[in-house]
């Protein structure tokens, strides 16, 4: 059945004015999407940044712990091998076998030790003069207090004609304090060695070393002097 022309015309007009659906996104939708992506990017970037900082802190913590353990190993080797023998410096000045002070130098601990390893069997002395120096660090603590670096230096043989040590090595950084106490043969603690007015005091029974180190805080270790026990 054929429709009247008037109806066909009406249908054509209705079809002409009917809007077709749009393809793509509107400007507002695009801006919203960009804003969401930017927020997500900031969140992800912040998480990655925190993870990186945490990893760096853990790595730094591990390195400092390794340095601390190595320092205590060296201290134990040096202190256990102390011998009652004086040493002369490049100026001819004589120093006791054990001391913890020196004019013009920041000597935290100085000692003469034996048992120096010589695996190659060279004609060298098995004794050496070892000193632990505290020197100002370039860093400061978060509270603004001064920090120090701990160095181990030695001369071999002890009576060296040179002011320059045979070797100098930095052991620790960010040291707040390095202190030594001495347990004498009467089992009394002394703050200095030799004790005041006792130039011929010999050797103590043991040494207590206290290190205040960032970020670990205060650590104490007791080291036995082998020769003082006649072993």
Image (cartoon, grey):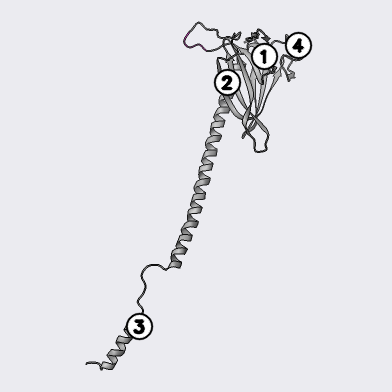
Task: Determine which quarter of the picture holds residue 227.
Answer: top right
Task: Determine which quarter of the picture holds residue 225.
Answer: top right
Viewer-nearest residue: 200 or 60: 60
Q: Would you say residue 119 sits in the magenta stretch?
A: yes
Residue 98 shows which numbered tag? 1
Residue 198 shows which numbered tag? 4
Q: CA distance from mark 3 to mark 1?
A: 106 Å
Q: CA distance from mark 3 to mark 2?
A: 94 Å
Residue found 51% across the figure and 46% down from its top: 49
Q: Earlier in the sequence, mark 1 or mark 4?
A: 1
**Farthest right residue in view:** 197
Total marks in image: 4
- As drawn, is 44 to the left or to the right of 202? left
- Residue under numbered circle 2: 74
- Residue under numbered circle 3: 17
The residue stretch that appears in magenta: 117-121
Viewer-nearest residue: 60 or 163: 163
Q: Would you say residue 149 is visible in this rendering?
A: yes
Q: Few, some or many C-alpha atoms within 10 Å of disc 3 (few <14, some 14-19, many ≥20)? A: few
Q: Would you say residue 225 is visible in this rendering?
A: no
Magenta residues, dominant SS class? loop
Q: Are marks 3 and 2 in contact (CB under 8 Å)?
A: no
Q: Few, some or many C-alpha atoms within 10 Å of disc 4 (few <14, some 14-19, many ≥20)? A: few
């Amino acid at each position: 059945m054929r429709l009247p022309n008037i109806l066909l015309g009406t249908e054509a007009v209705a079809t002409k004015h009917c809007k077709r659906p749009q393809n793509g996104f509107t400007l507002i939708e695009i801006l919203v999407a960009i804003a969401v992506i930017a927020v997500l990017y900031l969140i992800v970037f912040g998480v990655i940044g925190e993870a990186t900082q945490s990893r760096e802190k853990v790595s730094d913590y591990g390195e400092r712990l390794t340095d601390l353990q190595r320092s205590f190993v060296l201290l134990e080797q040096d202190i256990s091998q102390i011998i009652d023998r004086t040493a002369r410096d490049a100026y001819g000045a004589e120093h006791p076998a054990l001391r913890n002070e020196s004019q013009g130098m920041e000597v935290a601990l100085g000692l003469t030790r034996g048992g120096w390893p010589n695996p190659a069997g060279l004609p060298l002395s098995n004794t050496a003069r070892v000193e632990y120096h505290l020197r100002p660090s370039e860093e400061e603590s978060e509270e603004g207090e001064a920090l120090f670096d701990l160095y181990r230096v030695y001369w071999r043989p002890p009576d060296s004609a040179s002011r320059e040590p045979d070797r100098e090595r930095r052991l620790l950084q960010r040291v707040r304090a390095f202190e030594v106490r001495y347990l004498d043969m009467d089992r009394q603690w002394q703050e200095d060695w030799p004790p005041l007015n006792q130039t011929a005091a010999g050797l103590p029974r043991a040494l207590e070393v206290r290190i205040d180190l960032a970020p670990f805080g205060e650590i104490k270790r007791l080291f036995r002097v082998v020769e003082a026990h006649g072993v």
